[in-house]
Structure formats: structure tokens, C-alpha cells
């Protein structure tokens, strides 16, 4: 356990945020979570994902429906709580949407981060864990990818927001020694908490492979579209480093331990398993463990998609003392449990999408 007590979790009602909150509570932290429900189920009464995180752990979460673009509102929350460290998950993350609405993505992800950093500084809070992504590497030149691989050669706007933020954090930590930041570059998070109580339920149209595959297995969608079976890989489909969301969550607890004991200014770590799995292999494992059929249709590659990408996660092992523990089978079993226990996701009072722009819904 670190010397930190209160952790602010932005985007706490989202997929990775809600799973991470479970681990934080179990590790003994107080959690103050905020979310504007741009891509999570919830309303003025709160977040069902976080209510279930409370059920899983038997502990309480302080939650605010709040938007990072609303600076006075976020400032008030920092006035109310003595935050020791921020885990910053809140962002818009749909690659396709980011290409159609670049200003929305730059505004939300970059301005949201700027507001947060300024408010943290004015409240003497200089510790942060940032959700970055392996997308900052662009098309890999070498595999597995280490943290020293060049970044910036990115083909989509969402990925560029992560890259620009990492550059911003470099400048900030170079200018002021007080900052102590860890940027975690996630590979491909999948799966769900083993209780089946929390999982992935975005309010925007989802494009991630596993939720889509599960919808097909449930018969809610007719077929799983796979983009490209002519890649230069053993079975022709793209290869990714899938990581169980609970392994990813424990990486954040490990990052907090390091931040609290060590002033590294800005450190960057890959969070992945170090193993590449093809889309076809993932579908086969999913079918095997769920005993459900997933009809697939192969179509042309998507522009900007990468052939193969997996992590060298040895730096995180050495410096964070963190490794992944869960298999691809567990990723599929746990996701399927969540999906079958909650075929329509979290309970929704009102099924319309919540779109929040400039803090007004
Ligand atoms: N899921 C992935 O495949 C993946 C991979 C790499 C990195 N990441 C990053 O990890 C983080 C969490 O991803 P996730 O999969 O949980 O996504 P998510 O969409 O489920 O969670 C993000 C949450 O942030 C909230 N949010 C967005 N803008 C906000 C704002 N201005 N103010 C307050 N809340 C806001 C959303 O409502 C959502 O609940 C994101 O930063 C994402 O870019 C995700």
C-alpha cells in the first residue's frame, strides 16, 4: 500500500475505469470518481457500473457527474477533496468518430487534460497516471514493441490526441520538477470482472472486437465482420496483444505504488501480455469457451489498421513489479459471463445516447 490515500479517477464510470476502481478499493484507497457519461451508462443518480463496484468490494465511492471541460465544476471537486493522485482515464476513444469529428476529439481529450493539469497544479497535486495507448507507436518497425520505439507516426486523430498529450507531459515534467507522472500504454483490453457484475457497455456505437463478437454469439447481431484476411500473418488476420481488463487494472495499482515511493518525473510503460493473438485465433477461443457460434464475414482491410502489434512488457515487470496473470481463455470466459448475465448491459432508465459537448447535454 502506498502513502496515497485519495485517488481521483476521471472517466471512472467507463470500461477500464470501473474495473480499476474495484482494484483501488480492494487495495484500500478512497476513490473520488468523475464522469460526464459521454460513453458510459448513468445519470444524475450515478453510475450503475460504480454502484456494482461498491457491491463487489463492499466499499463506498464518491462520484460526481462532471465534465473535464467544465473547469469551475472540476475545481470545486478538488476544493472538496484532498486528492493525492489522479488516474486520468476520461477521453473519447472511437477511432472512426475521431476522423469525422477531429475538433470534438481535440477539444475533449486535449482541453480536458489541460484543465485537469492546471487544476491539479493549483491544488498542489502533482501525481498522475495517464491512460495512453499502443496506438502512439503507429505501424511497428520492430516487434515486440519496447517503450523506446519511436512514436508519432499515427494514422488517426484519436491516437494523435494520446501522442500530443504524451508530448505535453514531457514538456511539463521538464519544466517543473514537482510533476511525477506515469503514462501507461495499454495494448488491447478485453474481458470483464469475474463476478459478471461489471463489463464493457459503451453508449456510443461500439467497434471493439470482443463486445461485437459477444453480440453475434447472443444472436443480437448476425455476423462478425473481420477487416482483412490477407495480412502478412500466419492466418492472414491482424495480430494484437489482448490483455485482461483486471490485469490492466492491477497495473494501475502497481503504478501508484511506484509513484508514491519514487519521483521519476515522467515514466512510460507498456501494459500488455507480450503475446500476439490473431483475430481468427481469438474468435476460435471465444467459440470454444462459450460453446457459442460466431459466424464471420471477411471484408477488405480498414485504412490505417496495423498488421501486427504486441508488447515487450519487461520494463513494467522490472520497475512496477507487474505482470499479467490471466489467459486468453479467461478473457473470453469472463466477458461472456458479463454478457450473458447482462445481455442488455447495465440497467438504463432512458436508452437514448448521452452526447455531451462543452459540458451541456
Ligand atoms: N479500451 C481500449 O481499447 C483502450 C486502449 C488504449 C487506451 N485506452 C484509453 O483508456 C481510457 C479508458 O478507456 P475505456 O475503454 O474505459 O473507455 P470508456 O469510453 O469506457 O471510458 C472513458 C470514460 O470517460 C468519460 N469521459 C469522456 N470525456 C469526458 C469528459 N470530458 N469529462 C468527464 N468524463 C469524460 C466517458 O463517459 C467514459 O465513461 C481512455 O483514455 C482510452 O483512450 C483504451
Image: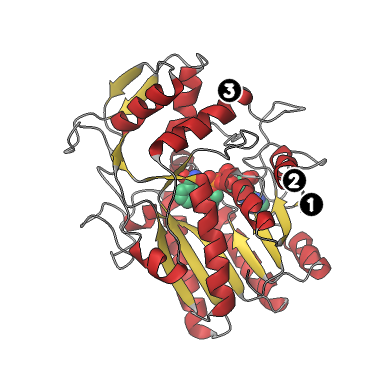
Instruction: Give the answer, above or below, for where 34 lies relative to 146.
Output: above
Q: Secondary structure at mark 2?
A: helix
Q: Residue at x 64, y 42 (%)?
A: 38
Q: Position of residue 12 (x, y in %)?
A: 66, 50
Q: CA distance from mark 2 to mark 3?
A: 21 Å
Instruction: Give the answer, above or below, for where 84 lies relative to 202.
Output: below
In the foreground, 321 or 268 = 321
Q: Are marks 2 and 1 in contact (CB under 8 Å)?
A: yes
Provide the residue designation for mark 2: 54
* 143 horizontally vs 11: left or right: left
Q: Residue at x 20, y 32 (%)?
A: 236
Provide the residue designation for mark 1: 60
In the foreground, 73 or 127 = 127
User: Mark 2 or mark 3: which comes first in sequence?
Assistant: 2
The quarter of the image holding the N terminus is bottom right
Q: Secondary structure at mark 1?
A: loop
> Which disc, if any, is residue 340?
3
Amino acid at each position: 500500500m502506498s502513502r496515497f490515500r485519495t485517488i481521483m479517477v476521471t472517466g471512472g464510470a467507463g470500461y477500464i475505469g470501473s474495473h480499476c476502481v474495484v482494484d483501488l478499493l480492494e487495495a484500500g484507497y478512497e476513490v473520488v470518481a468523475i464522469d460526464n457519461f459521454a460513453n458510459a451508462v448513468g445519470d444524475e443518480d450515478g453510475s450503475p457500473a460504480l454502484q456494482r463496484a461498491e457491491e463487489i468490494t463492499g466499499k463506498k465511492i464518491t462520484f460526481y457527474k462532471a465534465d473535464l471541460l467544465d473547469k469551475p465544476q472540476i475545481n470545486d471537486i478538488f476544493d472538496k477533496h484532498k486528492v493525492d493522485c489522479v488516474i486520468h482515464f476520461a477521453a473519447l476513444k472511437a477511432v472512426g468518430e475521431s476522423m469525422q469529428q477531429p475538433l470534438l476529439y481535440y477539444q475533449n481529450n486535449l482541453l480536458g487534460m489541460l484543465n485537469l493539469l492546471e487544476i491539479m497544479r493549483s491544488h498542489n497535486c502533482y501525481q498522475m497516471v495517464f491512460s495512453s495507448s499502443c496506438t502512439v507507436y503507429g505501424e511497428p518497425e520492430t516487434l515486440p514493441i519496447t517503450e523506446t520505439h519511436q512514436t508519432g507516426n499515427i494514422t488517426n486523430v484519436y491516437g494523435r490526441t494520446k501522442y500530443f498529450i504524451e508530448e505535453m507531459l514531457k514538456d511539463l515534467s521538464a519544466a517543473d520538477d514537482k510533476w511525477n507522472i506515469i503514462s501507461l500504454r495499454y495494448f488491447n483490453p478485453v474481458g470483464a470482472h469475474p463476478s459478471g457484475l461489471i463489463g464493457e457497455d459503451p453508449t456510443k456505437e461500439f467497434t471493439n472486437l470482443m463486445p461485437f463478437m459477444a453480440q453475434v454469439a447472443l444472436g443480437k447481431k448476425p455476423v462478425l465482420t473481420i477487416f482483412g484476411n490477407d495480412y502478412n500473418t500466419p492466418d492472414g488476420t491482424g495480430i494484437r496483444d489482448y490483455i485482461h481488463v483486471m490485469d490492466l487494472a492491477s497495473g494501475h495499482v502497481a503504478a501508484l505504488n511506484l509513484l508514491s515511493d519514487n519521483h521519476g518525473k515522467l515514466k512510460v510503460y507498456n501494459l500488455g501480455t507480450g503475446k500476439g493473438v490473431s483475430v481468427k485465433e481469438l474468435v476460435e477461443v471465444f467459440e470454444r469457451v462459450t460453446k457459442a457460434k460466431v459466424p464471420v464475414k471477411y471484408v477488405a482491410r480498414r485504412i490505417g489498421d496495423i498488421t501486427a502489434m504486441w508488447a515487450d512488457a519487461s520494463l513494467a515487470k522490472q520497475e512496477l513489479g507487474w505482470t499479467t496473470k490471466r489467459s486468453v481463455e479467461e478473457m473470453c470466459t469472463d466477458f461472456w459471463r458479463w454478457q450473458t448475465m447482462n445481455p442488455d448491459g447495465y440497467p438504463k432508465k432512458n436508452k437514448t445516447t448521452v452526447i455531451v459537448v462543452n459540458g451541456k447535454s
